[in-house]
Each structure stands twice: as C-alpha cells, then as structure tokens.
Image (cartoon, rainbow, N blue to C red):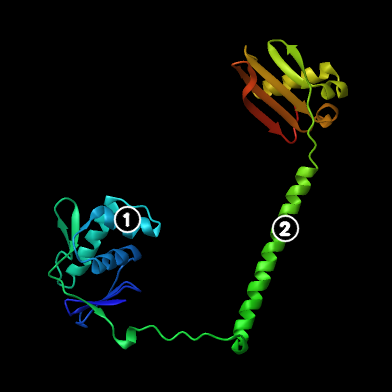
Amino acid sequence: MRYTLNACLIFDAVDGTLTPCDSATSESHLSVTASTLLLFFLQNTGVVNRDEVLKRVWDDNGHTSSNSNLNQYLSMLRKTFRLYGVDNVIVSISRGNLQLNPAISVEVMTSSANLLPDIVINTPDTFSTADNFSLSTTFWYLASVILLSLAFLLMIFTFYDGLAASATTLTHLHQEQCELSVEEEMLATFNQTAYVKNFNTVRKNLNVECLPGRKFIFFYGDKLQKQGLGRVFLAHCAKQRGNDFSYCDSYFYYSWNPT
C-alpha cells in the first residue's frame, strides 16, 4: 500500500520508504516499527488513545509496549517529516490522545502499477520440474525429521528401561565429631579403617570441618585405595527440621590423589 502525503511525499508501507516528489531531497527509510506506527495513523486519522496505539502497533505484533517506546518513535517520525517541511506530523491531544496532523492531506495510491499481479494456479498436470523438486525435497525433509524423532524417543525409552530402582542402605559412623553415612556395600568392600582414613584425607584437603548438625556421605572407587587415584564423591549436608539431607554441598573428582 502506498500513500501520497500533501501531494508531494510518497510513503510505501511495504518497504517503509518516504520518497519526496522533489528529486533534490533524498529518500528516507523508516524502521519496521516506525513504518507500522505511521501506517496506523494513516489508516486511523481521527483522535486515538495512546493505549490503543500501544496495543495495535506493539502488543498485537508480539512486541513489548511502553510509553517510552511510543514517545521515542513519535519523536523519530516528527524529525523525519521535518526534513520534508512537515512539522508535527503526529499531534498530541489532551488526556493522552494522539492524532495525525489534520493539516496533512492523505491519498491512497491505486494506480495499476501498485496492483498485485494475477496469481497463477498450477494444476497437477502442469507442475514444473522445479515444483516437483521442491515437493520431493519437502517430503524427504519431513521424513528425516520423523525418523530422527523416533530414534530419539527410542533412545530415551531404552535408557529409562535399563534403569532399575534400588534402595540404598546407609550405615552411620561417628568419626571424631563427624557424622558419616556410608553404603553397606562400601564397608563390605573396603576396610573400615582405610575408609575413614581416606574420608578424613579428602575432607581436610577440601578444608571442610566437622560441625554439630552436619552429616557427610563419602564414596570412592577402588583405585583410591590401591593406586591413590579414583573417582571421589563427598557430600557435606546440613540437617534442618528433621531432614538429615535438606541442604548439601557436593564435591566430585574423577581422579583423586590424596596428599
């Protein structure tokens, strides 16, 4: 849609250009929002409320509206039109209302050059090679998306199917002032003296103190005991309202070498 303003300025709502009839003056390009705002006032030449402008120009187009944004773009339009001798293209009315300046004449251009071209509909027998290629590409694209989605779902189902729920039994040890919870399997696998020694080594290396109301969970792989390296997990938890593990600071090391 194109508009003629004051019979000497052409506004193209499609590309947001302002083209003066005087070739000595350069063309201006409005931003998308500024172009939408100007088009709104050209289509609504009466007095409009600011809230209506914010809704139609910003909210209805998925943008965040604010009076600050509106004032910024009003200033931008006024400054641009001032280059073409049009002062105050949008005027402010009392009680927060706005209006396209009534002194500006507006005409909608309806020349044949601006009409949309006829739409040619191809029948199934007249599809071109390009059309067939486009359809084939679209088909294989959709098929690929479906296959990838099925593979992803199968991977998730396989993963969760392989998980077996099992309860972990913890044994409570008291080492100095530390309350230490350990899996029974850990105590059955490793010597308790060595386990406690390794716990204290890791805890002290991390500068974690034993304080009243705190509990620890400690786990390590067999490499820690045999070779001095291995996976190490230490949880330092605070007891609150009867829950021994209401809040925990956790430490994990893929390869630990106690010093």
Mark closer to the chain start, 2 or 1: 1
Residue 222, x across and y down, in percent: 84, 30
113 or 15, nearer to the observer: 113
**Kind of residue sitting beneath label 1:** Lys
Between 160 and 185, the residue placed more toward the observer is 160
Question: Helix or strand or loop: what does disc 1 sit on?
Answer: helix
Above or below, 122 relative to 185: below
Does residue 248 appear in this view? Answer: yes
Q: Residue furthest left?
A: 103
- Residue 255 placement, left or right of 32: right
Residue at position x 35%, y 84% from top? 115
Residue 153 bears which disc, if any?
A: none
Residue at point 32% right, 60% down? 57
Within 10 Å of disc 1 (Cα), the crowding (few <14, some 14-19, many 20+) is: some
Q: Report x, y in % for residue 31.
A: 33, 66
Q: Quadrant of the C terminus?
A: top right
Amino acid type, mark 2: Leu
Residue 167 appears left or right of 240? right
Secondary structure found at label 2: helix
Work out whether 55 lies above or below 121: above
Residue assigned mark 1: 55
Q: CA distance from mark 2 to mark 1?
A: 42 Å
Q: Quadrant of the N terminus?
A: bottom left
Q: Quadrant of residue 104?
A: bottom left
Q: Quadrant of residue 247?
A: top right
Q: Which residue is mark 2?
A: 150
